[in-house]
């Protein structure tokens, strides 16, 4: 009788950490998805801070769990639960925001911070995923690399643009043409006359609202800023 009681006690002790681990990973994943969605519509600076820091919170959780929580544990026992959704969604939202919200005038100064941030993030993911009992699979390495590159791209754009303290230089340009591209998502373009440092006629991606409220022959306003990382970027708005 006492042997059965001892076994039940051991099971209870072992199940408690498992339940706690699952609760932590579920909470982190859910909050990560919600935070990513909110950041799309929230103040750009505050939203950028959330998206920049959230993956590092996940790495801290992995390291503090001492192997109970993994970045990606699809091929591992259930006790090694995963926070990959909570890391993935903020990174993808941040990359999407950098692509959709900002247009870079020049990319010469983009690649160094992109490479450095990507390397640091890849090293952090790798360090958090090391387990002496289980080798890191090639699939996990590819997953970590893709997330590191996406983080490098998104964070470089956010740091450069969302935290840019420079005043905009304002130029006027005439609209020579409008085009709407429909695919998985709709992208709108305007062909503009030369303005400021842009010395040639060029088609630029514009906001959907602006596309609906301008026509060929109108004059639009180009707001050019220098960027915190010295990567010039601009936004086209209605004059």
Image (cartoon, rainbow, N blue to C red):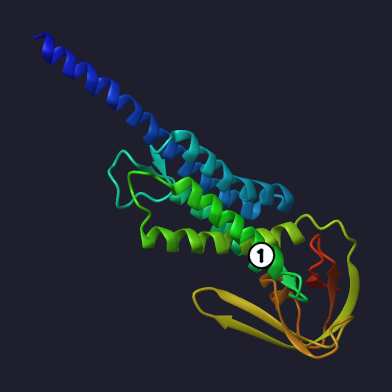
- Asked if residue 53 lies left or right of residue 29, the reply is right
Of all residues, the one furthest to the left in this rendering is 1
The residue that mark 1 highlights is 114
Q: Position of residue 149 (x, y in %)?
A: 56, 64
* Residue in the picture at 91% in, 70% down: 169
Q: Quadrant of residue 178?
A: bottom right
Q: Quadrant of residue 78?
A: top left
Q: Residues within 10 Å of mark 1 (few under 14, many from 20)?
A: many
Q: Is residue 59 visible?
A: yes
Provide the secondary structure element on which disc 1 rests: helix
- Asked if residue 192 lies left or right of residue 30, the reply is right
Q: Is residue 97 visible?
A: no
In the displayed structure, 28 sits above or below 162; it is above
Closer to the camera in the image, 186 or 129: 129
Q: Quadrant of residue 192?
A: bottom right
Q: How many marks?
A: 1
In the displayed structure, 7 sits above or below 239; it is above
In the displayed structure, 200 sits above or below 126; it is below
Closer to the camera in the image, 177 or 107: 107
Q: Position of residue 30 (x, y in %)?
A: 47, 43
Placement of the C terminus among the 4 image quadrants: bottom right
Closer to the camera in the image, 97 or 157: 157
* Residue in the picture at 70% in, 67% down: 112
* Residue in the picture at 62% in, 55% down: 40
* Residue in the picture at 58% in, 82% down: 181
Q: Position of residue 14 (x, y in %)?
A: 28, 25
């Amino acid at each position: 009788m006492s042997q059965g009681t001892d076994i039940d006690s051991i099971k209870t002790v072992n199940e408690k950490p498992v339940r706690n681990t699952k609760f932590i990973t579920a909470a982190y994943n859910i909050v990560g998805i919600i935070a990513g969605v909110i950041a799309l519509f929230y103040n750009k600076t505050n939203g950028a801070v959330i998206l920049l820091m959230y993956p590092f919170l996940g790495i801290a959780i992995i390291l503090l769990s001492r192997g109970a929580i993994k970045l990606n544990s699809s091929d591992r026992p259930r006790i090694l639960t995963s926070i990959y959704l909570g890391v993935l969604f903020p990174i993808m939202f941040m990359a999407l925001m950098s692509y959709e919200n900002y247009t870079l005038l020049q990319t010469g100064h983009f690649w160094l911070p992109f490479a450095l941030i990507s390397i640091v993030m890849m090293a952090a993911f790798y360090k958090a995923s090391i387990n002496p009992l289980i080798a890191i699979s090639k699939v996990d390495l590819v997953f970590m690399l893709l997330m590191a590159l996406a983080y490098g791209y998104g964070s470089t754009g956010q740091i450069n643009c969302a935290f840019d303290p420079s005043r905009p230089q304002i130029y006027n340009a005439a609209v020579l043409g409008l085009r709407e591209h429909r695919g998985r998502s709709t992208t709108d373009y305007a062909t503009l006359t030369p303005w400021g440092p842009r010395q040639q006629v060029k088609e630029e991606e514009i906001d959907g609202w602006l596309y609906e409220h301008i026509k060929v022959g109108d004059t639009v306003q180009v707001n050019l800023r220098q960027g915190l990382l010295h990567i010039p970027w601009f936004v086209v708005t209605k004059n």
